[in-house]
Image (tube, rainbow, N blue to C red):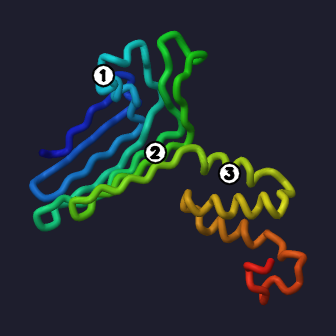
């Protein structure tokens, strides 16, 4: 089918899809997470979602299988009991989800909040060597490789002068 879009009444969110026999795409900007509520089931009543997400996905038929990738991003969202913000059941910040479909296999990567937390930590002046080491190592799982290297270069060498030539099991 040709490109088709759903637009929110307020004109702020948009979800679009386009598919043909061999390829397709789906995109969205500021899509309300409330769209998941019908799938929460009747057992979950009195719960409302909040937040928006952006998404971008591309898929193509390769041989007899479909392959592609879908990326979701949301700055903030979650689930609340009916009645307001004071009854939040679940909340996240900095959510990223990547779904990859290759050779009939699904791979899923999820990250939430760690990148935001690390950014705030790195803004603190004069981090200790242990803190720099922690931040540098944690930047790798959120795929901030250049920042990880930059941060780890700030870690001073150990005081033990022969640390480079000594067997690590003896340190």
Extreme residue toward the front, this view: 170
Cβ atoms at labels 2 and 1 below 8 Å apart: no
Local crowd size for mark 2, using a 10 Å CA cut-off: few (<14), some (14–19), many (≥20): many
Task: Locate residue 126 relative to residue 10 in the image: left or right.
Answer: right
Residue 101 in the image: state x and y as whole percent: 28, 58
Q: Residue at x 43, y 19 (%)?
A: 48
For the N terminus, the quadrant is: top left
> How far separated are the C-alphas under marks 2 and 3?
17 Å
Q: Position of residue 72 (x, y in %)?
A: 41, 46
What residue appears at the point 60 percent right and 16 percent down from the top-left corner? 86
Q: Is residue 58 left or right of residue 157?
A: left
Q: Which secondary structure lies at badge 1?
A: loop
Q: Which quarter of the rendered picture does the C terminus lie within?
A: bottom right
Which numbered dot is residue 73? 2
Image side of residue 164 versus residue 99, left or right: right
Above or below, 5 against 171 in this view is above
How crowded pointer 1 is (Cα within 10 Å; few <14, some 14-19, many 20+) is rated as few
Residue beneath label 1, please? 41
Q: Which mark is residue 119?
A: 3
Check whether the beta carbons of the residues at disc 1 and disc 3 lie within 8 A of each other.
Answer: no
């Amino acid at each position: 089918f040709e490109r088709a879009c759903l637009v929110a009444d307020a004109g702020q969110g948009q979800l679009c899809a386009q598919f043909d026999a061999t390829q397709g795409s789906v995109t969205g900007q500021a899509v309300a997470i409330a769209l998941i509520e019908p799938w929460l089931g009747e057992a979950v009543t009195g719960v409302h979602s909040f937040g928006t997400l952006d998404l971008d996905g591309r898929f193509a038929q390769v041989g007899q299988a479909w392959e592609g990738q879908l990326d979701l991003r949301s700055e903030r969202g979650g689930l609340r009991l009916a009645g307001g913000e004071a009854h939040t059941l679940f909340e996240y910040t900095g959510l990223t989800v990547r779904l990859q479909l290759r050779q009939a296999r699904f791979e899923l990567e999820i990250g939430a909040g760690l990148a935001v937390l690390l950014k705030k930590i790195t803004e603190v002046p004069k981090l200790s060597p242990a803190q720099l080491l922690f931040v540098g190592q944690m930047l790798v799982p959120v795929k901030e490789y250049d920042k990880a290297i930059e941060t780890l270069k700030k870690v001073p060498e150990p005081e033990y002068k022969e640390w480079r030539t000594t067997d690590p099991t003896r340190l």
